[in-house]
Amino acid sequence: MKKYILLVFLLIISNLHAQEKVNSIMTLSEYLGYVKNYHPIVKQANLIINKSEAKLLKARGAFDPKIEVDFNKKQFKNKEYYNKLNAAFKIPTYYGLEFKANFENNDGIYLNPESTVPTDGLYSAGISASLLNGLLINKRMAALKKAKLFLNQAKEDQQILVNQILYNASLSYFNWLKNYNEKKVYSDFLNNAKIRFNATKRAFIEGEKPAIDTTEAIITLNNRKLSLEKARIKLIKSSLELSTFLWLNNNTPVELKEHIIPDVNTLNSIDTTFNIALFNNANFDINKHPKIKSLGFKIQSLNIDKNLIKNNLLPKLDVQYNFLTQNINKINTLNIQNYKAGINFKLPLFLRKQRGDLKLAKIKLQDKEFENEIVKITIKNKVKAIQQELRSFVYQNELTTTIVKDYDTLLKAENRKLFLGESSLFLVNYREVKLIGAKLKAIDLENSYYKTKANLFKTAVILLAE
C-alpha cells in the first residue's frame, strides 16, 4: 500500500513537472535582457567605446614629459676624437609652449669648438614657443580635442548599434509569437475536425448520415492536419531564428527548448518593455537623439580641423630662450648674461595649399551640417508616421476583434443547427474556415502592431527599460 501511495505521489510530481516544462514562458523583457547582456554583437558594440578611450589615451600621450639622452663617442688609434653627452627633460604644454632642462658634457681633441663646455658640463633651462602658427591650436591640441569628441560620439553610436540589435531580436520574438499563435489556432480547430469526423462516422454507421458526409469530414480533418504541420514547421524555424540571439555569458550559443513558449499577453507589457509607455511627440527632443548628437560631435570635430587648417595660414614663428650655467646648485648663476636663443620664421608666399585645404574643410563642414538638418527632419517625420500608424492599429484591432466574435457566433449557431438537423457539414466547415481566416488576420494584425512598436523604439533610439 505504501509503495502504491509513493508511486502515485511520484507520478503526480512528474506530471506537475511536465506541465511546468510545457508552460515555461519567456517574456519579451526576459528575452531582450539576455540579448542585451550576452549577445556577442552587443559586446562588440561596447568595443567602440574601448577603442575611443584608447585613442584618447594616445592623444594625451603627446603631452607626456620626455627624457632624452644623446651620447656619441669616437675613439681611433688611441685618440679620443670626441665624447659628447646631451641629456634633456622636456615638458610640452597644451598650447604651443614647451619647457626644457638640458645638460651637456663634451670633450675631445677634435671636438667642434661650438660644442665646448666647462669641464663639469653645462646646464641650461628655458622655454620654446610657437608665437603665431601653432600657439592657440596645433596638431597635438587638435588631436586631443578630437579624441574627446570621438569618445562622446562613440557612446552615441554604441547606443544606436545596441538599439538596432535589440530591434532585430524583438522582430524574431514577434515572429515566434505569431507562429505560436497560428499553430495554436490550427491545433484547436483540428480537435473540432476530429470530433465532427467521429460524430459523422458514428452517424453514418447508425444510418443517420450518408457516406459522402464522412468523405467531407475526413477531407476537412486532413486539411487541418496539413495546416497544423505547416504551422509547426514555421514555429520550429522561427524558434531557431530566435535562438541566434540567445547566448550565455561565456559566449556559448543557446538553443531554445520545445517547452519554452512566448508570452501570449505581450500586448499588456510591450510599452513597458520598450520604455515607450510615456513617449510623447510633444516631449520628443530631436536634439537629444543619439544620431543627432553623434552628428553634432562630428561637426565639432570638423570645426577643429577647419580651425587647424585656418591656423596654417599664419606665418611660422618659433622662438626659444635658454639660461645657461655651469653650477646648477646656485640659482643666482641663471641670469640673462648667459643664454642661448633662437628664432625660426617661415612664410609661404602664395599660401595656395593652405587656402585649398581650408576650402575643402569648409565644404566638408557644410556637407555634414546639411546632413544633420536632413536627418532631423527624417527622424521627426518617421516618428510622427509611426504614431499615426499605431493609432490606426487600435481602430483596426477593434474591428478585427468584432469580426472574429461575429464569425464565432455564426459558427456556434451553425453547429447548433447541425445538431438539430437543420444545417449541413458543408456550411459548418464554411463557417469554420471563415473564423480561422479571421483569427489568422487578427494574429497578423497584432504582429504588425508589435513590429510598429519596435520600429518606434528603434527610430527614437529609446533606452531599454532595466
Image (spheres, helix red, strand yellow):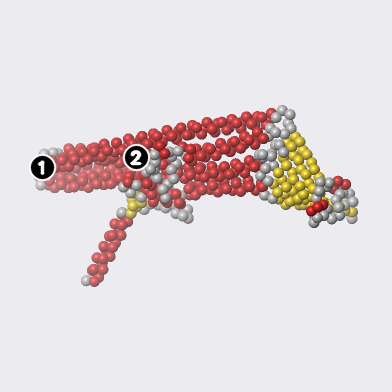
Q: Who is closer to the viewer here, 439 or 163?
A: 163
Under mark 1, the amino acid is Leu
Q: Position of residue 141 (x, y in %)?
A: 64, 42
Q: Position of residue 323 (x, y in %)?
A: 79, 48
Determine the residue positioned at 46% across, 32% down. 377
Left or right: 74, with 284 as reference point = right
- Considering every residue shown, the one lying at the far bottom of the view is 2
Q: Who is closer to the viewer here, 345 or 260?
A: 345
Q: What is the quadrant of the N terminus in the image? A: bottom left
Q: Which residue position holds label 2?
A: 449
Left or right: 292, with 134 as reference point = left
Under mark 2, the amino acid is Tyr
Classify 192 as above or below 391.
below
Q: Secondary structure at mark 1?
A: loop
On the question of residue 246 being in view, the answer is no
- Label 2 vs 1, first from the N-terminus: 1
Q: Place residue 119 in its image quadrant.
A: bottom right
Q: Secondary structure at mark 2?
A: helix
Determine the residue positioned at 74% across, 37% down. 317
How far separated are the C-alphas under marks 2 and 1? 42 Å
> Mark 2 touching mark 1, by CB under 8 A?
no
Determine the residue positioned at 69% across, 39% down. 134
Which disc, if any, is residue 255?
none
Which disc, if any, is residue 420?
1
